């Protein structure tokens, strides 16, 4: 979606709601997975009925040479990820957040079954707290978009144009208080003598931050790299999928060896460190963008 946003919606104002809504559906859908049950036979039956139509339509689409597709799909995102500090730092930040959603599917079951004797299904329902936080985060992103548009009035470098770093305004406190604070809360409220609702509230804070941060990253990169937005977002998506695949694998060992409190605290400290990325961009973002070859080319296109 973000890859197409710069082409489908030509102005940053037009992109606000579509990208925010897409990010919400994207993150919330993943979060609700453990709490929902899918009937595979119905899905397969539905797909089999549509397959002939889909196959016919696909065959009628003209495709570029596979070598061109592979070159553009692999080399440019890799170059952006390796040579652009903006893409690299924001990818780490967003990927960590996205990986936490998947890690939570493991840690919640382990924490709540051990401390509160929850069954696996009951532990899965705790995942809804993240979804609640993400929904609140989605609602918070709407005035954040308005704040971004109003930043044009105080842009002295390019009068009338919104300041790109205004996209990150809400994400910094969300990262500090919601992500890092929520992780510390979740960890140090996980004791048998503490009611299970208290660590659950901490998870809601994490969900809020995840939504706000991923939306801010998608918005900022799409606006900054308009011409190359597809490749830049592909680099972010690569990081997100890598973290989503590997971070949950460490959950059981980390929470067993470090304990529930210090395992979540370790993640909280990582969240604090990654908050330096948006802080640095708000502080020196104009200088960073001016030195970026890709951003200069995108601006001149």
Image: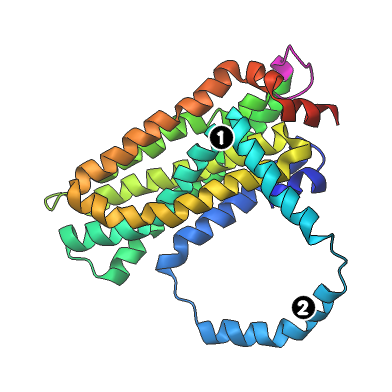
Please identify the quarter of the rendering in which residue 69 is found. bottom right
Residue visible at 83% across and 75% down in the picture: 59
Is residue 184 shown to the viewer in this render? no
Is residue 229 shown to the viewer in this render? yes
Q: Is residue 291 magenta?
A: no
Q: Main secondary structure of the magenta part?
A: loop
Secondary structure of the residue carrying numbered label 2:
helix
Q: Residue furthest left?
A: 193
Residue receiving disc 2? 54
Q: Is residue 65 left or right of residue 117?
A: right
Instruction: Kindly report which numbered mark, 2 or 1, lies closer to the viewer in this rendering.
Output: 1
The label shown at residue 88 is 1
Q: Position of residue 213 (x, y in %)?
A: 52, 39
**171 or 129, nearer to the observer:** 171
**268 or 71, nearer to the observer:** 71
Please identify the quarter of the rendering in which residue 214 is found. top right
Task: State the count of labels.
Answer: 2
The answer to which of marks 2 and 1 sits earlier in the sequence is 2
Quadrant containing the C terminus is: top right
**What residue range appears in magenta?**
153-162
Residue visible at 73% across and 18% down in the picture: 153
């Amino acid at each position: 979606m973000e890859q197409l946003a710069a082409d489908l919606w030509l102005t940053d104002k037009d992109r606000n709601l579509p990208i925010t809504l897409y990010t919400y559906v994207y993150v919330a859908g993943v979060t609700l997975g453990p709490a929902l049950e899918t009937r595979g036979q119905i899905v397969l039956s539905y797909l089999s009925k549509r397959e002939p139509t889909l196959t016919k339509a696909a065959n009628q689409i003209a495709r570029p040479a596979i070598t061109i597709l592979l070159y553009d799909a692999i080399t440019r995102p890799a170059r952006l990820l390796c040579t652009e500090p903006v893409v690299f730092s924001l990818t780490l930040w967003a990927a960590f957040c996205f990986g936490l959603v998947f890690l939570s599917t493991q840690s919640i079951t382990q924490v709540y079954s051990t401390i509160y004797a929850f069954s696996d299904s009951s532990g899965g329902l705790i995942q809804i707290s993240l979804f609640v936080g993400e929904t609140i985060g989605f609602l918070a992103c709407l005035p954040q978009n308005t704040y971004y548009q109003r930043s044009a009035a105080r842009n002295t470098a390019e009068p009338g144009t919104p300041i790109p770093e205004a996209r990150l305004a809400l994400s910094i406190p969300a990262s500090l208080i919601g992500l890092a604070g929520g992780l510390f809360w979740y960890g140090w409220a996980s004791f048998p003598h503490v009611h299970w609702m208290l660590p659950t509230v901490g998870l809601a804070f994490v969900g809020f931050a995840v939504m706000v941060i991923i939306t801010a990253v998608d918005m900022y990169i799409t606006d900054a790299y308009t011409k190359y937005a597809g490749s830049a977002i592909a680099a972010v998506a690569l990081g997100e999928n890598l973290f989503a695949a590997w971070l949950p694998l460490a959950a059981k060992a980390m929470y067993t060896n470090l304990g529930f409190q210090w395992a979540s605290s370790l993640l909280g400290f990582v969240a604090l460190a990654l908050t330096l990325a948006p802080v640095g961009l708000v502080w020196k973002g104009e200088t960073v963008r001016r030195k970026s070859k890709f951003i200069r080319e995108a601006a001149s296109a």
